[in-house]
Image (tube, grey):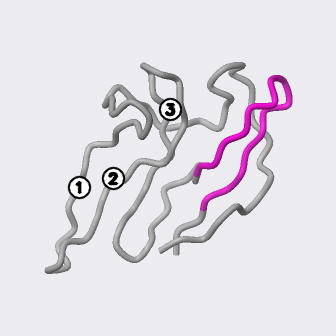
Amino acid sequence: MGQSNSYTCKECKKHLIASLVDTRGINQKVLAIKCNDCSSVSDSIIEYSSNSNTIIKVEPSCYECSSINVVKWDGKCPHCNIKMTDNGLFSLWD
């Protein structure tokens, strides 16, 4: 079961939901990424299972702008570049 946490920046009060670590649900694996084009942070699918149970790897991309110019999110605010506070579990998903 996948897990997403809630994060808040102490400086600018930005709030976001992400996994921070690679997490896997029943049919997909996601990675929290930061987009170098639009500065958003989101989970990106990096693997999924096909109907024949074959694992298919996917290049991570930005949920907001669809860019592939992304990096693994380091837990820092995309605006202030300071470590965000992990507020704990936001949701469990499959």
The answer to whether 43 appears left or right of 47 in the picture is right
Badge 1 element: strand
Question: Which residue is drawn at the image coordinates 34% and 73% (left, top)?
Answer: 27
Which residue lies under the disc numbered 2?
A: 46
Q: Does the magenta stretch include residue 14?
A: yes
The magenta stretch spans residue 23: no
- Closer to the chain start, of discs 2 and 1, is 2
Find disc 3 in the rendering and name its residue: 34
| Amino acid at pointer 2 | Ile
Q: Which segment is the magenta one? A: 4-18
**The quarter of the displayed image where residue 8 is located:** top right
The residue at 22%/68% (across/down) is: 55
Q: Which residue is drawn at 80% across and 42% down?
A: 85
Tell me, yes or no, whether the two marked residues, 2 and 1, touch with CB atoms within 8 Å.
yes
Residues under labels 2 and 1: Cα distance? 6 Å
Q: Residue extending furthest bottom?
A: 52
Give the residue pinned by disc 1.
57
Disc 3 crowd, CA 10 A, few/some/many (<14, 14-19, 20+): many
User: What is the secondary structure assignment of the residue under circle 2?
Assistant: strand
Q: Residue at position x 49%, y 62% from top?
A: 23
Please tell me which of labels 2 and 3 falls first in the chain: 3
The residue most toward the front is: 64
